Amino acid sequence: SGVRSNEDMAERQTARQTVELGDVQRTLFFPLAARARETRKKRPLLRDLKAVEIVESVDFELAPIAPGPTALVVTLRTLIMDWWVRQFLAGHPGGTVIELGTGLNTRFERTDNGTAHWIDLDLPDTIELRRRFFADTERRQMLAASLLDEDWLPAAEQRPGPYFFVADGVLAYLREEDVTGMLARIAGRFPGAMIAFDTVTRASTGQELKMAAKRDVAPWQWACDDPRSLERLGLRLIESVPVTRPPAGLRAELPARYRYLLPLGDPIFGKRGLSLNLFQAG
Ligand SMILES: C[S@@+](CC[C@H](N)C(=O)[O-])C[C@H]1O[C@@H](n2cnc3c(N)ncnc32)[C@H](O)[C@@H]1O
């Protein structure tokens, strides 16, 4: 049924005391919890102390993702998107990163170079929650908006280019025509911008539907078997990888056990059908 109307969301919020977020918004706790858990490991792949702090202070009633493949997929997805953002900022230290559907993501904390500009965009109730843990600065700003609307585009345009848009674990929850409309709009308004997001395959959505029902969160709505097909929207596909095949530079930084074992995980992770894609507009 797509993104819920505000009225609909308000109704749910009064119905639930402990979790004051809409069904799609509540999915933000899964990646947050996965990154917090990874951080607590003896030899973690990423350190996200802010995620640990938030997880310890928010009271949410969701069955967390069990340790295992799903949590590792989230960690790897984070590492790969972080890697692309770092590459971008290395080339454009004063550019702007726009995190679409940011949830309680701490990518800025993980990748900031001291000069980058940053926009964290999400729906109003998520941003309200986010403001409990993050503050705006001169270089960094939170925006309460739907990524499907146009009203936030001027705020991005006011920041210095070039631009890097990232939507991490977000677009699968939206309707196909909404996603393609948004991508075409960004491609048209920000020529040359980089856009990174994950896609899930049609085959992988059945399993996910069951999990979503079990956890009472929004199910996926958009599957895309061939990211290249999105080039028709005015985008060029630069790189597309499964989480088991991180970009070469990142793979070289991973602990040896992951470097060698990850490709062997293809049969398990492959079923999850997640691709991480990096596009350039125009
Ligand atoms: C699975 S969470 C991912 C959060 C974050 N990207 C991360 O990796 O931790 C999905 C996020 O998308 C946001 N979202 C869903 N629909 C949206 C929309 N139309 N506009 C902006 N954000 C949206 C939700 O509020 C939620 O924070």
Image (cartoon, rainbow, N blue to C red):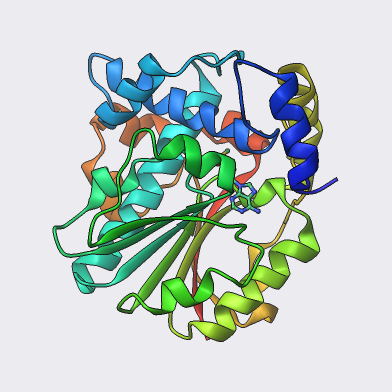
Decide which of 26, 267 is in the foreground and name it: 26
Q: Is residue 128 above or below residue 81?
A: above
Quarter of the rendering containing residue 266: top right
Decide which of 280, 251 is in the foreground and name it: 280
Residue 205 in view (yes/no) = yes
Question: What residue is rendered at 40% in x and 20% in y?
Answer: 55
244 lies left or right of 5: left
Decide which of 23, 244 is in the foreground and name it: 23
Residue 104 in view (yes/no) = no
Q: Quadrant of the N terminus?
A: top right
Question: What residue is rendered at 78% in x and 47% in y?
Answer: 5
The quarter of the picture showing ligand 1: top right
The image shows residue 245 at horizontal and vertical percentages of: 44, 46
Q: Is residue 63 above or below residue 145?
A: above
The image shows residue 51 at horizontal and vertical percentages of: 34, 28
The image shows residue 214 at horizontal and vertical percentages of: 76, 17
Quarter of the rendering containing residue 175: bottom right
Decide which of 73, 140 is in the foreground and name it: 140
Question: What residue is rendered at 44% in x and 72% in y?
Answer: 155
Question: What residue is rendered at 34% in x and 34% in y?
Answer: 133
